Image (tube, rainbow, N blue to C red):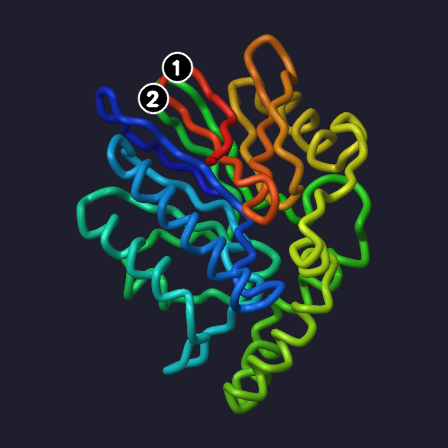
Amino acid sequence: MDRKENILLSTDAKIYFASDFHLGVPDHQRSLVREKILVQWLDEVKKDASVIFLMGDVFDFWFEYKTVVPKGFVRLLGKLAEITDSGIDIHLFRGNHDIWAFNYLQEELNIQLHRYPLTTKIGNKTFYLAHGDGLGPGDKGYKILKKVFEFKPNQWLFKWLHPDLGARMGLYFSKKSRIANLAKEGKHENHLPIEKEPLYYFSKDMLAKHPEINYFIFGHMHKPTQHLLSNNAELVVLGDWITHFSYAVFDGEEMKLKYFK
């Protein structure tokens, strides 16, 4: 289910996009270092940001009970609240690692939470925005698993676990993941050429059906990529904040992929 809405771009303001912070892995100490760098970046971009899009997997594991959320991440959460309190909109897309974000971030931090891809007009350009997991051909196993995780009775059953047990289980599997191992070793993830990636096939197919789209913006695939799909359309994969510290910025006319040093 895709959504559509228009976003007005203020004069001289910019739109920022970032994704895949995976806070929490490989351990608290190294995650905290990355969290502090992320807060520094937010302090920089808030100076001229009109809107900030966080495109998923902010946390490597996140589950909201009715009255309990995972502890930690207070520097980031405080900074996000400060930014929205100042009048800058923040949009958060659920990724495959924070799929169980429900309403806490929306109610407490005034973040606009997206559960489905969004088609939006920003300035005079049309954007297709999504985390990117499950899009394109292949990966049938994950697509089935995603439906299991999104099945509301399963979420209801998980909520009956004591938060300490539920979080411990989630973090255990999280720290065994491929992403956690990459974070521990400080290595880049290996990828196929972009023309062979599912997100490329998905974007080309969507562009054939909707030629008005100018930018496809995704997270999920951790290799920063800016690829021309046609004379008027680009595919932008935002990379991650594990080894790349990459992001994209749109100034109303041009999209640039950058790195925060």
Marks 2/1: CA–CA distance: 8 Å
Pointer 2 or 1: first along the chain: 2
Q: Which residue is located at x 42 percent, y 32 percent?
A: 120
Residue 130 against residue 26 in the figure, above or below: above
Which is in the foreground here, disc 2 or disc 1?
1
Element at label 1: loop
Q: Nearer the viewer, residue 235 or 46?
A: 46
Q: Nearer the viewer, residue 247 or 199?
A: 247
Residue under numbered circle 2:
123
- Type of amino acid under label 2: Gly
Q: Classify residue 184 by image quadrant.
A: bottom right
* Residue 255, percent from left and from top: 46, 21
Where's residue 129, x and y in %? Answer: 51, 37
Local secondary structure at mark 2: loop
Marker disc for residue 119: none
Which residue is tagged 1? 253
Residue occupying the point 56% across, 67% down: 61
> What kind of residue is marked 1?
Glu
Residue at 24% of width from left, 20% of height from top? 12
Q: How many marks?
A: 2
